[in-house]
Amino acid sequence: MNFTQKTLTTLLSLLFSVNAFSQKKEIYYGQKATLKAEVILESGETKNGFIENFAIPRIGSNLQSVTSIEKRLNFTSKEINFKTTATSVKEALKIEDIKRIIILDADDSERLIYDKMKLKTINTQLEVVDLDKTVLLPLQQEGKLSLYGFSVTMMSTNNLQGFGTAKHYDLTLFIPYIKNKNSDYAYIPFDINRMNFLNIGTLEGKFKIAVEEATKDCPEFSQFMKENYEKMDKIDKKELKKQYFEKEDKKKEIRKTVKNKDMQNFLQAKVDSEYGMKPYIQIVDQYNSTCTK
């Protein structure tokens, strides 16, 4: 299959999901008033019913700042409003009593999972810091080591020379969290909250320590990563350029083919998110295939 065929196949698969997305847009952006859901409590009880005003997105947009991003996107919510039927009286469920929330389609064909966890990050001195923060995060890939995270879309405003302004899609970043099933804590390999031009040189060290902390229960994986860090540092620049241009070509094709701006922005965000998520999925997959005990 040549590159043009690859691009077309990818685009068609993305377009195939457009109808489903357009029906679920409010869910992905945390804007739907009532959602069918299963709520699994710490006690082991499962409550089936509906959640009201679940404003926790899988895609964040229109952010004025990325500092305190978990709070801005409502991942630090203290409670949710739950009803057993669409017309019953609502009750407040405290997040401290919740283990997992599963958002369901009307026909139960898709299950969007959110898990509760605490957070640790790595500071500029490369020390592990407990953030003293409990969050509900979207699950991306589940295993003994799981990947959580969400995407943040950046938009700019263009001046239309006397005809007002228009929003322009720039890029979408994937914000990762990795969590070992034997721990209450997730670690943040790329902590956008604490990133600036003054500490950008510590990003690699923070990434390594976050991964090491989340996976230290498996010496085989630790040895694998140690042996491969040098290879990762020397990654082929041609391969990086190839991936970059491949991603940009897919987005260019979307802009040419899809005329609806909201749909166009979502499909571009999906492409950016998939490429941003890829290295973390590779780490999670490698751990789960290596550490089977």
Image (tube, rainbow, N blue to C red):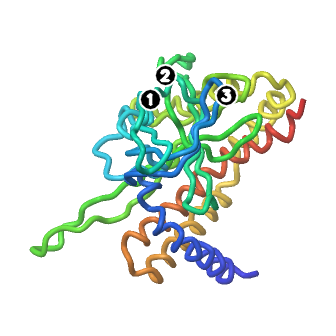
Q: Which residue is mark 2?
A: 124
Three-letter residue code for mark 1: Asn
Helix, strand or loop for disc 2: loop
Question: Circles 2 and 3: CB distance less than 8 Å?
Answer: no
Sequence-first tag of 2 and 3: 3
Left or right of 63 in this view: 142: right
Whole-percent x and y of residue 83? 46, 42
The crowding category of the residue bearing disc 1, from other C-alpha atoms within 10 Å (few below 14, some 14 to 19, many at least 20), is: few
Q: Which residue is mark 1?
A: 199
* In the image, farthest residue toward the right: 293
In front: label 3 or label 1: 3
Q: Give residue 218's quadrant in the image.
A: top right
The crowding category of the residue bearing disc 2, from other C-alpha atoms within 10 Å (few below 14, some 14 to 19, many at least 20), is: some
Q: Which residue is mark 3?
A: 44
Quarter that holds the C terminus: top right
Q: Nearer the viewer, residue 142 or 164?
A: 142
In front: label 2 or label 3: 3
Q: Nearer the viewer, residue 159 or 183?
A: 183
* In the image, farthest residue toward the front: 88
Q: Is residue 46 above or below residue 52?
A: above
Left or right of 261 in this view: 75: right
Left or right of 120 in this view: 43: right
Between the C-alphas of marks 3 and 1, the distance is 43 Å
Between the C-alphas of marks 2 and 1, the distance is 7 Å
Helix, strand or loop for disc 3: loop
Question: Circles 2 and 1: CB distance less than 8 Å?
Answer: yes
Helix, strand or loop for disc 1: loop
Three-letter residue code for mark 3: Gly
Whole-percent x and y of residue 16? 59, 76
Whole-percent x and y of residue 277? 61, 50
